[in-house]
Image: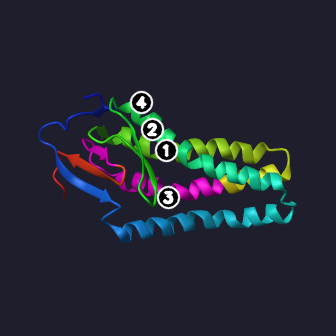
């Protein structure tokens, strides 16, 4: 197995080590939604100061609507690009009634690859939208960029949580993404 790539099927000797399933763990789902609000709050003063200095025009609302429509598929598409980069299965895009997902069931990714897959949308979108927010020449455009930056950052609470939780997985860990959760397998006994 290459160090940073996914494998299929699960290699011999690996056992279930950890699991996140958001359809079965509603407490965790609520906690992630609270985290989303907490990630949004630090940006509120900036957005309020920009909006108080700006006459919010129709162009803001049109840009906001377009941005909101695009953020979710772009976010999941970035996950999909990295799934394809590290795995050789087919990416499945799904809507679960409360969230969209990209996954590659049946492919088991190394810890390093999965951390990249998990973090890639928030890193890429934060960089791209953040640059627009910093260099946009008009106040309305600057406000729009900061609002979209904040929404996409807060919306990535689940990804941020997973990357944080999986940062200390054993080095031999393999992660399967099921769309509504992740299964971690390892040869290392759980302590």
**Image coords of residue 168 (percent x, y):** 33, 52
**Image coords of residue 153 (percent x, y):** 58, 54
Residue corresponding to mark 4? 85
Q: Secondary structure at mark 2?
A: helix
Q: Secondary structure at mark 3?
A: helix
Q: Secondary structure at mark 1?
A: helix
Q: Earlier in the sequence, mark 4 or mark 3?
A: 4
Q: Is residue 103 left or right of residue 121?
A: left
Cβ atoms under marks 2 and 1 closer than 8 Å: yes
Q: Is residue 99 left or right of residue 11?
A: right
Q: Earlier in the sequence, mark 4 or mark 1?
A: 1
Label 4, label 1: how far apart the Cα atoms are: 14 Å
Label 2, label 3: how far apart the Cα atoms are: 18 Å
Magenta part of the chain = 149-178
Q: Is residue 40 left or right of residue 117?
A: right
Residue 154 vertical placement versus 14 (above, below): below
């Amino acid at each position: 197995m290459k160090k940073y790539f996914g494998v299929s099927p699960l290699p011999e000797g690996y056992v279930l080590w950890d699991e996140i399933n958001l359809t079965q763990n509603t407490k965790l789902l609520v906690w992630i939604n609270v985290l989303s609000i907490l990630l949004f709050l630090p940006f509120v003063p900036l957005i309020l100061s920009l909006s108080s200095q700006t006459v919010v025009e129709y162009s803001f609302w049109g840009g906001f609507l377009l941005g909101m429509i695009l953020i979710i598929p772009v976010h999941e598409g970035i996950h999909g690009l990295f799934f394809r980069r590290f795995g050789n299965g087919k990416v499945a895009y799904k809507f679960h009634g409360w969230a969209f997902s990209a996954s590659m069931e049946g492919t088991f990714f190394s810890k390093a690859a999965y951390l990249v897959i998990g973090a890639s949308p928030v890193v890429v979108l934060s960089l791209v939208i953040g640059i627009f927010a910093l260099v946009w020449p008009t106040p309305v455009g600057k406000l729009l960029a900061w609002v979209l930056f904040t929404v996409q950052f807060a919306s990535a609470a689940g990804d941020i949580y997973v990357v944080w939780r999986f940062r200390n997985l054993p080095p031999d860990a393999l992660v399967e993404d099921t769309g509504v959760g992740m299964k971690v397998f390892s040869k290392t006994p759980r302590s």
